[in-house]
Image (spheres, grey):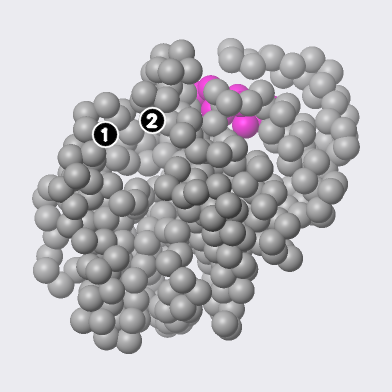
Amino acid sequence: MPAIDLDHGVKIFSTCPPSKLSQPGAYFRQVREIARWSEDAGCEGILVYTDNGLLDPWLVSQVVIEATEHLCPLVAVQPAYMHPYSVAKMVASIGFLYGRRVHLNMVAGGFTNDLVALNDPTPHDERYARLVEYTTVIQNLLRTASPVSFAGRYYQVANLKLAPPLPAELAPSVLVSGSSEAGMEAARQLGATAVEYPKPAAQYGTGGAVAATAASNGIRLGIVARPKDADAWSVARARFPEDRKGQITHELAMKVSDSSWHRTLSELGNAGSATKSPYWLVPFQNYKTFCPYLVGSYDRVADEVARYISAGYRTFILDVPASPDEMQHIGLAFERATRRHAA
């Protein structure tokens, strides 16, 4: 399968499947398989989720690394699970053992019930303030071989030294998940990529206006693209059929969520969309995935992606790939999108 040929600084990450829907042996094989598809397609890396109901993302990332040559895990990191020193130690240890770079996807919290179970009552915006301190300690440890001291509201370390030190060429990129103002501000303070769940592309301006809100910007979305619109929609609807049980689960999740992106996407779904729009929220509304989809012909999807690129987005985190062929279809749409942006 030919690798996706991109320019203009565009980076693509795929997503590792969540473990909760798989059997032990089958999941191990599935992670290896999808990691190889992603690498063969030319992805920069692969997002590995974290929450109370999933396997440890660092152990899953090790499976990814051992199955591939250069694919970089994008590890979701939640402050409630690990001390910042432990995160830095994991990054440095992977660099030492495998010579592989690891990216960090910093999440301020998780599902509300997970936080309650962990006895973490910290309010939404305050969790982002805590995340800034947490990530700063990690970055300081990874950037220097000298002892690090930090005195913040949530974290304090004194003369803390990371061993082994991380080679500079393996320094991780940092992404911050969060579409809220607090999330954007956290990304700005950290010099990180702010990752959002996008609205329809027509709602964004051009000329880099989006990029000005953070050091850089990214979005999470799924794509189903084929040579013709009808073929793409046929595949999409077969993969994500209407599911009343899933709709009820989505409604229950909305009632207990304080997530800005969850609320925004739900409101967009309730408002409906133009019939001809490739922007599709049915998988999200039926609790099959947590991002919007673009569905249509290569050219139709490419037009939408090109608008996101023109608005300032350069990092794209795709949903879990369905097959290696699906990655090839997505690649064709992205290649056309970067050419449209250049034109």
At a point 55% along the width and 77% down the height, the residue shown is 4
Specify few, some or many for label 1: CA neighbours under 10 Å numbering under 14, 14-19, or 20 or more.
some
Coordinates of residue 71 in the picture (x, y in percent): 66, 61
Identify which residue, 110 or 245, lies in the foreground: 245
Identify residue for label 1.
253
The number of numbered discs placed on residues in the rendered structure image is 2
| Vertical side of 98 occupied by 158: above or below | above
- Which quadrant of the figure contains the N terminus? bottom right
Q: Which residues are magenta?
A: 129-137
Asked whether the beta carbons under mark 1 and mark 2 sit within 8 Å of each other, the answer is yes
Residue most extreme to the bottom = 227
Residue 1 in sight here:
yes
Picture quadrant of residue 252: top left
Residue 245 in the figure: left or right of residue 201:
left
Coordinates of residue 67 in the picture (x, y in percent): 69, 61
Magenta includes 99? Answer: no
Identify which residue, 129 or 279, lies in the foreground: 279
Q: What's the amino acid at mark 1? A: Ala
Identify residue for label 2.
111
Q: Which mark is residue 152?
A: none
Coordinates of residue 142 in the picture (x, y in percent): 77, 37
| Vertical side of 49 occupied by 203: above or below | below
